[in-house]
Image (cartoon, rainbow, N blue to C red):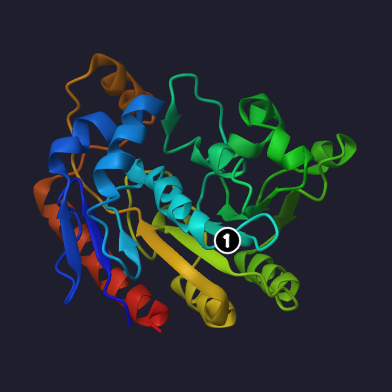
Amino acid sequence: MNSPLILDFDQSVGHIEHAKTLNLTTWQEQIRFGCTKKIFNKLECYLQPQLPKNYGTVLMGSGDYHHLSLLLIKQLADRYSAKNPIEVIIFDNHPDNMRYLFGIHCGSWVSHLARLPFVSHIHVVGITSSDISLYHLWENRLAPLLKKRLTYWSMGINTAPMQKLGLGESFRNFSSADELIASFLAEQYYNQKPIYLSIDKDALSEKVIHTNWDQGELQTYHLLDTITAIKPRIIGSDITGELSIWHPKSRFKRLLTLLDKQPNISQATLKQWQQEQHELNLTLLDALKS
């Protein structure tokens, strides 16, 4: 088994036995939530020589860093191609395919991922956010949806208008989490393509875990059942969605954080919720290990 890798931007990931940790705390202000493409490329150049030759699941801290999954997936370009592609499965309460005019951020990285030639399809599983409702449809990048390179698997969203727009195959909606996962795994049953799995724990219900964001309805067993079903095909994975307190220096990022309505959390509550997060991480890592 390859050892887990911790990209430590915010010191929110607890101790993981045998994990390798890269201290990236000096990058937090530049990278967290979003950054310009220039800074993103700068971090990529900085990280490449430091990444272990072989590593297991990557833990990145807060969901504010989910755009770093793009960087990790790009590392697979020397092993896969358009003729030998992979699929990417993302557990997330949000589509992460939104328009962002200032570079790349945690809510827009999927649109960049869809442009990689060796990624044949992306599934975002567990969405309950209104980000994919008709009212917010214009905020989504439509190209990967129209080209059928991206599928949203959601609950509680009125997708009927998308059917009329010819986006029915890209917008799947279900009445319950059990129904969603059952349908998703049934579709995956005959698929043999390699998979990169990215887990943002905000896809889980607040009854399971707490994050800094609005959360979905999935239960832990939905993630574990999926991992069990697709495990022979997983060629890379990451976990994000930790809790950490951040006070950005930039006025622009302070505004973005305010717009996201991230809650104020007491130190006592933070410590308790981080311990719950840590225990879930250990459960997921145990399921993912080969």
Indicate left or right for 210 with 118 as reference.
Answer: left
- The residue under label 1 is which amino acid type? Tyr
Is 199 situated above or below 54?
A: above
Q: Quadrant of residue 39?
A: top left
Residue drawn 75% across the image and 70% down it: 187
Q: Nearer the viewer, residue 151 or 181?
A: 151
Residue annotated with mark 1: 80
Judge from the rendering whether residue 159 lies leftward or rightward of residue 249; answer left or right.
Answer: right
Q: Observer-nearest residue: 51 or 203?
A: 51
What number of labels is visible?
1
Task: Where is residue 279? Give x, y as percent.
Answer: 25, 72
Q: Residue at x 34, y 75 (%)?
A: 285
Looking at this view, is 172 or 157 the one in front?
Answer: 172
Q: Nearer the viewer, residue 106 or 182?
A: 106
Residue 98 versus residue 237 in the image, above or below:
above
Indicate the position of residue 272 as horizontal and vertical percent values: 17, 61
List x then y, in percent, for residue 13.
Answer: 20, 59
Kindly give the residue lying farthest to the left in the view shown: 267
On the rendered structure, is 234 left or right of 279? right
Task: Please say whether residue 226 is visible from this viewpoint.
Answer: no
Residue at (50% x, 24% y) in the render: 100
Choose top left, top right, bottom left or bottom right for residue 14.
bottom left
**Quarter of the image where the N terminus is located:** bottom left
Residue 169 on image: x %, y %: 81, 51
Label 1 CA crowd tier, 10 Å (few <14, some 14–19, many 20+) = some
Vertical relation: 290 (above or below) 68: below
Residue 137 occupies quadrant: top right
Q: Is residue 24 above or below residue 15?
A: above
- Per the image, label 1 sits on a secondary structure element best described as loop
